[in-house]
Image: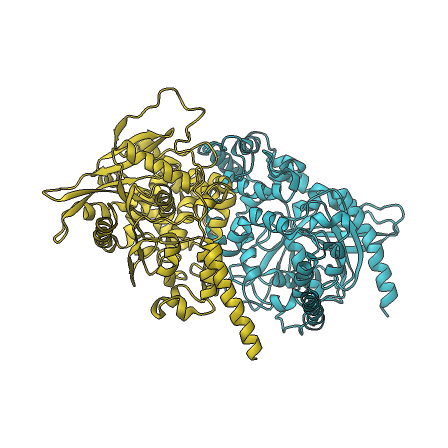
Chain colours: A cyan, B yellow
Amino acid sequence: MFTSFSIFAVVIVGLGVFTHYYLQRAPDMPKLDLNRWWGDGNRPNQEDVTIRPFKIVFNETMIDDLKMRLRNRRPYTRPLEGMQSEYGMNTIYLEKLLKYWQDEYDFKGRADLLNRYPHYKTRVQGLDIHYMRVKPEAKGKQVLPILLMHGWPSSSKEFDQVIPMLTTPRNGYDFIFEVIAVDLPGFGFSEGTNKPGLDPLQIGILMKNLMKRLGFDKFYIQAGDWGSQAATHMCTVFPDDILGFHTNMPVSIRRISNMKTLFGSLFPSLAVEDKYRHRMYPLSDTFSYLMREGGYFHLQATKPDTIGAALTDTPAGMAAYIFEKIAMASNKNQLDTPHGGLESIALDDLLDTATILWANERITTSMRLYAEAFAPSEIFIVHEIPTKVPTAAIKFLHEIVYQPDWILRDKFTNLVHSTTLDVGGHFAGMHTPRELADDVFESVVEFIKFHEKYDK
Amino acid sequence: MFTSFSIFAVVIVGLGVFTHYYLQRAPDMPKLDLNRWWGDGNRPNQEDVTIRPFKIVFNETMIDDLKMRLRNRRPYTRPLEGMQSEYGMNTIYLEKLLKYWQDEYDFKGRADLLNRYPHYKTRVQGLDIHYMRVKPEAKGKQVLPILLMHGWPSSSKEFDQVIPMLTTPRNGYDFIFEVIAVDLPGFGFSEGTNKPGLDPLQIGILMKNLMKRLGFDKFYIQAGDWGSQAATHMCTVFPDDILGFHTNMPVSIRRISNMKTLFGSLFPSLAVEDKYRHRMYPLSDTFSYLMREGGYFHLQATKPDTIGAALTDTPAGMAAYIFEKIAMASNKNQLDTPHGGLESIALDDLLDTATILWANERITTSMRLYAEAFAPSEIFIVHEIPTKVPTAAIKFLHEIVYQPDWILRDKFTNLVHSTTLDVGGHFAGMHTPRELADDVFESVVEFIKFHEKYDK
């Protein structure tokens, strides 16, 4: 018995030493092409670097066609007796949403609402990128540029409630933000590439080039989902140019972090505060949740063109598919209700997202990002390199993954601010814009302090 | 060094003893309701047990609507530069298939072709079940009843080339078959249930009741894919009534078989003949293949109603989705071609399958089977119980899984015939009807010998 324990102790200590010295070691930064061409064909001799004002238009032809398709939809198979969302989207509930989209959603009014901000497009590395650029009502405050980056299946629209909260002066803060809310390539109104390889690392490089085009050499970032992955790579590749990174999906996928997560499952009380333990352990709960909810991820990471071809042809089907995933990332306690969690977001906001995806035919190009993220490339080296960029993590209650700060620090060595909330979900800009904006202000105070302390 | 080896040997032997005595042990058969009601509401006092002749009709309204939808299809996102099927269905190739479906596929002629066999429907346990029943040109031969069971996304149509090969007399054989080719509930022209729980075990019970309705107390079975799973359960639950089981997807998923597969990866030369080793090992290749190709399985096992809602509304999308999977199960060496393996099946046969699924709106009901197969039920106990039914395994080259006979015998203790071919794929009735029919005749000779030897 004693011997068994000794062997166990030796193994644990040995593994500890191994993980510390071997897995903590960061690889060298690979050589990256910082100006890869993602447009059709080859790079032209003269690149178009103009910045063009843009207005969102949902045109009559698109609207009529969309409504025709919704009207001509074939009847759905009803849910199995006694089931809500256990087998996926509840088709009775879905019908209500589709009827609203068809008969009541105000296409023009919603476009006008988005057009209250100034929109632009400019070509970066061959792709026409759309963004909103909103200058603040400054009045004697320091203006700080901040790039907002969304994830799937969103667009910059996800931030429309957050933007005014960042551009309006606040008591107690001597700074204010100029917001650049961008659509990732292949999402929203931004062009997708026709070349393989545009993974989150490459998107990060492209975003850095966009900000340079707009005249920002150094700036802050707020991001979630794939936007947060791309931003994490920006922080790793351009550590001197990102002034601070605020993420609502903080995650380190370094090998050492995975190892710590596994070891933590043996001693959860050492790994994570008691009150947040259920967000992480038992791992079996997390795996069950990811297994139950991760089919879309598996499919998009392997066959995006197939599911893309299917969803390109049916607005009702596309809505069912994306709404089911928005629902699951909104409220883990409501998975087995008819709406699956969807009712924590206003229906008009959901339909803005669906309409933008549909009108721009971005379903295939946006889903391809999952496949690119797992294709062999330098990204797997960059994942392992920590970043010194001061970082703030906000952890909402229903976020898909949870990591405690000591694991996040494997990647973000200067995690200067961390907030854990008992509300909110994955689409923070839509669920809890106020909490998100408040935390950005608080975090930037810490970022500024960090630079005052450590910069020469 | 010697000590390490000794420890290793002790561990291996110990695990061997453990697996033999613990994992080989079969649980008791659970108590099963052999007449569960799958129809809407409650069982009526008087059940309809009539057998009604049926004809396949692709009606004008359906055809016009289908063609309208194909014509109005939105343009596809083209494949990424240099890619064939690496990101899923090649949309340029797909367009050709869809154009053929829209302009050249002969709906009436294809229905007539299927109607050359006598079709019937009858209600079993509340569900209207469709089947073909084809009596042979007997002339002094013994007539043996055989039930043919297909899988996803097929129907009894999969067997239309095999049927005449089984019902035509052969030199050297003094028996011939009467064929019952059935559509599984929720597939083809068979009604789906509106109640949860209709898993492969329950389908097996329903099929047994169908055969009883048709007057067959004892019969043979040929099956693949989910049909083979259902048939395996029939063999386990009704061992005295199944005279012999011929399967083209032979698989034991008993725990001991999984254990043997794992151990075999340490000593592959002991686990599997050299010439077939690459069909099984290295396991990493198998896992990569299943990971790359298994997204649809993951999604259908967790969210069938979501993907069902999407594919119900677009014939083009439904075709893309099912054709990609038919392709992958057809030829593993052609995964990265534009057709992905699809060209090993005639286009008209593929479109029969698509048209039947579409016309009957069976996409959701058929995909739900994946979810039911993993829902908690007695099925996990029945999986662990071996069957004494004499069994024949035919292993085609591109079948999704491969198990050597010594593993198959964990489940099928009387594996009396085994054939491994260097041709063919998962949809044997469509790829290689001749090889399939030949092997059925050869196997039934062995089944008869088995009964002569062991039955009183």
Residue B341 screen position, x and y as percent? 36, 58
Can you say whether B357 is above or below B328 in the image? above
Q: Quadrant of residue B49?
A: top left
Outermost top residue: B45
Q: Nearer the viewer, residue A101 or B134?
A: B134
Number of callouts in the render? 0
Residue B423 screen position, x and y as percent? 29, 61
Q: Nearer the viewer, residue B455 or A204?
A: B455
Quadrant of the frame with the N terminus of chain A: bottom right
The residue drawn where x is 34% and y is 38% is B188
Q: Quadrant of residue B29?
A: top left
Q: Quadrant of residue B207?
A: top left
Q: Is residue A193 left or right of residue B141?
A: right
Residue A379 screen position, x and y as percent? 61, 66
The residue drawn where x is 27% and y is 36% is B217
The residue drawn where x is 27% and y is 35% is B56
Q: Is residue B292 visible?
A: no
Q: Nearer the viewer, residue A309 or B237?
A: B237
Quadrant of the frame with the C terminus of chain A: bottom right
Residue A152 screen position, x and y as percent? 60, 50
Can you say whether A364 is above or below B199 in the image? below
Outermost bottom residue: B1
